[in-house]
Image (cartoon, grey):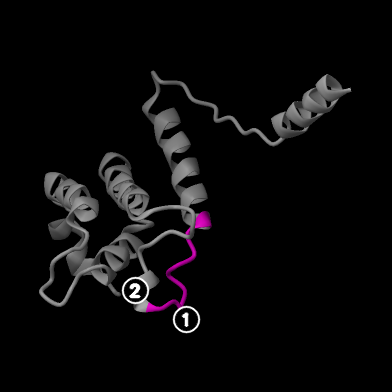
């Protein structure tokens, strides 16, 4: 009986799975897969709505932690750099700027040190700040 219940549970979950079509030899296929993932990720992010408190902008809902939010923003900067898709640049800039302190520093440093380094590598600030509307 227990085995039957386990198999039924696994079968039910298997239907929830999702796969991307990806040809790693095709730049277009890689960009399409990356776009699908980036759009899905941003559909999950809700902390840029008008009524969101400033301290929540740029963070992810529980049970996700600050370092995971840093990975999201750094990943979206990489996404922009590799695909030239500017769809999320304003949201990324808003998230980064909302997490600055009174001295324009980031706390905790460990979270933002990797996220801040990524834009430097890709010259993100020069590319985005002139067009930032937040």
Residue 133: image location, x then y, percent: 29, 74
Q: Nearer the viewer, mark 1 or mark 2?
A: 2
Q: Residue furthest bottom?
A: 51
Name the quadrant of the N terminus: top right
Q: Is residue 49 magenta?
A: yes
Q: Residue at x 13, y 44 (%)?
A: 121
Query: Few, some or many C-alpha atoms within 10 Å of disc 1 (few <14, some 14-19, many ≥20)?
Result: few
Residue 59: image location, x then y, percent: 38, 62
Q: Disc 2 designates what residue?
A: 55
Residue 19: image location, x then y, percent: 59, 30
Q: Magenta span covers which residues? A: 44-53
Question: Magenta span: helix, strand or loop, mainly?
Answer: loop
Name the element at disc 1. loop
Q: Is residue 94 above or below residue 68?
A: below
- The image quarter in which residue 4 lies: top right
| Front-lying residue, 42 or 47 | 47
Q: Disc 1 designates what residue?
A: 51
């Amino acid at each position: 009986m227990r085995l039957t219940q386990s198999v039924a549970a696994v079968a039910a979950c298997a239907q929830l799975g999702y796969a991307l079509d990806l040809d790693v030899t095709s730049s277009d296929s890689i960009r399409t897969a990356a776009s699908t993932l980036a759009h899905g990720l941003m559909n999950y992010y809700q902390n840029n709505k008008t009524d969101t408190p400033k301290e929540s902008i740029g963070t992810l809902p529980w049970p996700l932690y600050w370092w995971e939010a840093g990975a999201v923003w750094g990943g979206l900067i990489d996404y922009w750099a590799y695909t030239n898709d500017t769809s999320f640049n304003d949201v990324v800039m808003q998230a980064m700027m909302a997490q600055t302190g009174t001295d324009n520093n980031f706390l905790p440093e460990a979270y933002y040190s990797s996220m801040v380094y990524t834009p430097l590598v890709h010259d993100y600030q020069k590319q985005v700040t002139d067009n930032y509307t937040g």
